[in-house]
Amino acid sequence: MKLPLDILPEVRRAFAANRPVVALESTLITHGMPWPGNLETARAASDAVRGVGGVPATVLVEGGFLRIGLPAERVESLARDGVGVAKLSRADLAAYLATGRTGATTVAATMVAAHAAGIEVFATGGIGGVHAGAETSFDISADLHELARTPVAVVAAGAKAILDLPKTLELLETLGVPVIGHGTDVFPAFWSRESGLRAPLRADSPAEIAAILRTHGAIGGGGLLVANPVPAEHEVPAARLAPLIAQAQAEAVAEGVTGKAVTPWLLARLAALTEGRTLDANRALIVDNARLATRIAAELCRPF
Ligand code: PSU
Ligand code: MN
């Protein structure tokens, strides 16, 4: 059977005119931030894509379709519904599609949808990865395996700093995923520009990243991670965050938070512990990632 896609007319027209299209995820809206900052961030990301000549395509599972691109009203109602909406990874997609239920897509599920629709670039905040304590919990985001298999460039400010970043980089290497620092030799840590770890690869322009994606495809590779540091004026320094992240991680264990709830819980806790500074950084980095993703997508629109 063919995957049922419901592509927004604006996105269809962009394909027909060979204009850059950038996929955006919906879990970020429903589970990544509280109302109304989530709506403002979603709007700002879409505006950022349009501001540099692209068309945003926010992905959602609904009515038996993978929706590629959403009208503004649907983005708003999603933002209002928040964590009441299901959070879908690759493993959940078939069940939700087959039964016509609604669900927001994570990085992994958004990559599946983007690829099915022919979109090569996707912007988000930070990917999921290996959680602290994974050696006993086995909690490793499906985002990593999706990057290994699905040929989409994911532009993110690294992996979320609530994760075990050294293990996340190790696993990405094992899985054959190119991790490319954009304009940096340092792997960024989501809300902070520096993680203390080296970025395995570096590229300094959208054209270079587009060329790497094409070449990675030629060797039979899957996706790649473009690690774009949060703009300096919005970063929360890693040294300030480190004790708060450790505190939040310990609290999550003490409260028995597991599975899909872990990431949203930790993000919300860090927002509270920093009086919203992580939310400001989160919004700024998503907007910056959306812009870079559009520039990469524009390069991919040129004949190769
Ligand atoms: N990036 C953000 N905020 C988020 C996420 C990413 O800035 O909330 C979401 C993405 O949807 C990502 C998910 O795929 O968190 C990871 O969840 P998990 O660790 O359960 O795989
Ligand atoms: Mn998990």
Image: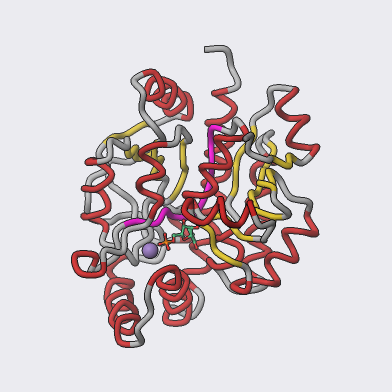
Extreme bottom residue here? 255
Decide which of 5, 119 is in the foreground and name it.
5
Magenta part of the chain: 120-129
Residue 137 vertical position relative to residue 218 in the rendered view, above or below: below
Looking at the image, which residue is at 78% across and 30% down? 13
Image height check: is 254 above or below 175?
below
Residue 201, given in percent of the width and then of the height, sits at 28, 35
Q: Position of residue 242 (x, y in %)?
A: 28, 71
Q: Quadrant of the N terminus?
A: top right
Vertical side of 111 occupied by 262: above or below:
below
Magenta stretch contains residue 104 = no
Q: Residue at x 45, y 76 (%)?
A: 265
Counting labels gives 0
Q: Residue at x 35, y 83 (%)?
A: 256
Classified by dominant secondary structure, the portion drawn in magenta counts as: loop
**Where residue 11 sits in the image (x, y, percent)?**
73, 36
- Residue 304, image x and y in percent? 52, 12
In the picture provided, is 172 more to the left or to the right than 142? left
Q: Considering depth in this image, is 211 or 79 the residue closer to the camera? A: 79
In magenta stretch: residue 126: yes
